[in-house]
Structures are given as C-alpha cells and as structure tokens.
Image (cartoon, rainbow, N blue to C red):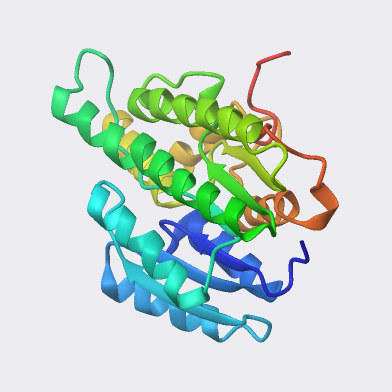
Amino acid sequence: MNELGRRVLVTAGSNGLGFAIAKRLAADGAQVVICGRNQSALNQAVVELQNSTACKGAHGIVADLGSRSEVDMLFDRAIELMDGVDCLVVNSGHMPYGTIETLSDADWDDSYEMLLMSAVRLSRAAAKQMKASSQGGDIVFVTSAGVHEATSHLLLSNVMRAGIAVVAKHLADVLSNSGVRVNVVAPGYFDTGRVRNRIDALMREQRLDRQGATEQIASANPSGRIGTADELSELVAFVVGSRARYLNGTTIVIDGGSGRLVT
C-alpha cells in the first residue's frame, strides 16, 4: 500500500514517542488520528500536525486506554473520521516503577488493562476492519527493549509488553494471507517523559545533578547517549512503508546497542 494518503491511528499520540510517530507519518501525507487523556495537550498536538504541509488531516480524541468502553469508542470514532484505518500504531502510557515486592494487585490490574488489554482490543478491531477492506494494512506495537531483557524497576512494563510481543506474533500468523502485517518496535531509553522522570528519581535517590543522572542512564549504551524521538519515528515510518513489505511478525529492538541478548 502506498504510504501517501494512509489513514493512521496512533494511540498516546499527544506527546513523546507517540507524537513523534504521528508527526512523521503525517509528513508522509497520512491522515492521522491521535488520542490522549489531556484535552489541552491533545489540542496543541493536533494543531501542530495540521500545520504539516503534507498532512491530509489530523484529529484528536480524548480517551483512556485503560477503559474498555473508551478504547472501543476511540477505534469507532477513528473509523468515522477517516472512513477506515489502514495503519494502527499502538503506543501506551507508562506504569509505576516497582518490584514484585512493592507492586500491589491494583498496580498489576491497572497495568493489565492499560498496556496489554488496550493492545489486544485495538489490534483485534483493526485486524477485523483491515481484513474486511481487502486493502491490507499495518499494525505496529511500540513496546520496550525490556521484552527481551527485564529491567528491575520496570517489572509491570516488562511483563505486559512481553505479552504484547506474543500477541503480535500470533496476529502476524493469523493475518498472514490477508495483506496485513504486524510488527513490534521495542525502544530502549529515549528522551521522553518517562526517562526524564527516571532521571529525576536518580537525582533524588542518589543526590546526582541532572547531567550525572543522565550519564548514568546512558552509561550502559555503547553510543553513550539516549535516543531521540525522531530516531524512533523514522524506524516506525520504515516498518509501515512499502520498502519493508517482507517484514512481518518481527520485534525490532532500537536501543543504541545497550542490549546484550544474542540470538
């Protein structure tokens, strides 16, 4: 499918990695629907997307991905606004830091709904719609490098996003003859709100200045730095583009080389 004129839904797209992805795909001439929980941030993001010269249209929908009814509403409304969705980018918010000893049942329940079940519900709806259209499509899950290597303070994210990778592989198999491709992009540390919060936590816990805390996070990375949102959005644009038609059922880690898993 030609990237130009694609109808794209990006969740959690009002800021951070989600917004960078939406902006990059809009620059390719896509129609874009984004969602977020903050109306003001969403409005600002939509205006910036609409100002892109190539963008075919941008809309924002207030939705909480932790709510089943709001996830259903989000997808139905995106269909109404764009007359279909042929590219779904499932991005989501972040759960509290914690370990098996500190996280409560409520934390686990919230993470299950927000991260895993929102991905299941959205991809299930998108798969049904894309198959029925006979035009093919792309589903991309933005997860975390932690799907392969657990991070001690990100247990909730690691467990739920590993589940998403399994869902993605299953969907890729189920949809193999439909023209719908399913892939996972798994970022390491990027310059987003979550990483900035982690830097703030290190500053408090270890009494570091901002530069020292940032260097500590980047120290395990051979590139010696944290990634930028634009670097991730370029990868997503390639994954959903026509040059990557043979790419399917794959998890791509983009972490600057900090991972140590060898396969």
Residue 21 coordinates in the image, percent (x, y): 58, 60
**In the displayed structure image, the side of residue 246 where residue 178 appears, left or right:** left
In percent of the image, x 35 and y 70: which residue is there? Answer: 61
On-image quarter of the N terminus: bottom right
Which of these two is toward me, 170 or 113? Answer: 170
Which of these two is toward me, 261 or 89? Answer: 89
In percent of the image, x 68 and y 57: which residue is there? Answer: 134
Asked if 126 appears above or below 15 in the picture, the reply is above
Is residue 175 visible to us here? yes
Residue 62, quarter of picture: bottom left
Asked if 238 appears above or below 215 in the picture, the reply is below
Is residue 96 visible to us here? no
Residue 38 coordinates in the image, percent (x, y): 27, 66
In percent of the image, x 46 and y 49: which residue is there? Answer: 91
Residue 60 coordinates in the image, percent (x, y): 39, 73
Residue 251 coordinates in the image, percent (x, y): 65, 32
On-image quarter of the C terminus: top right
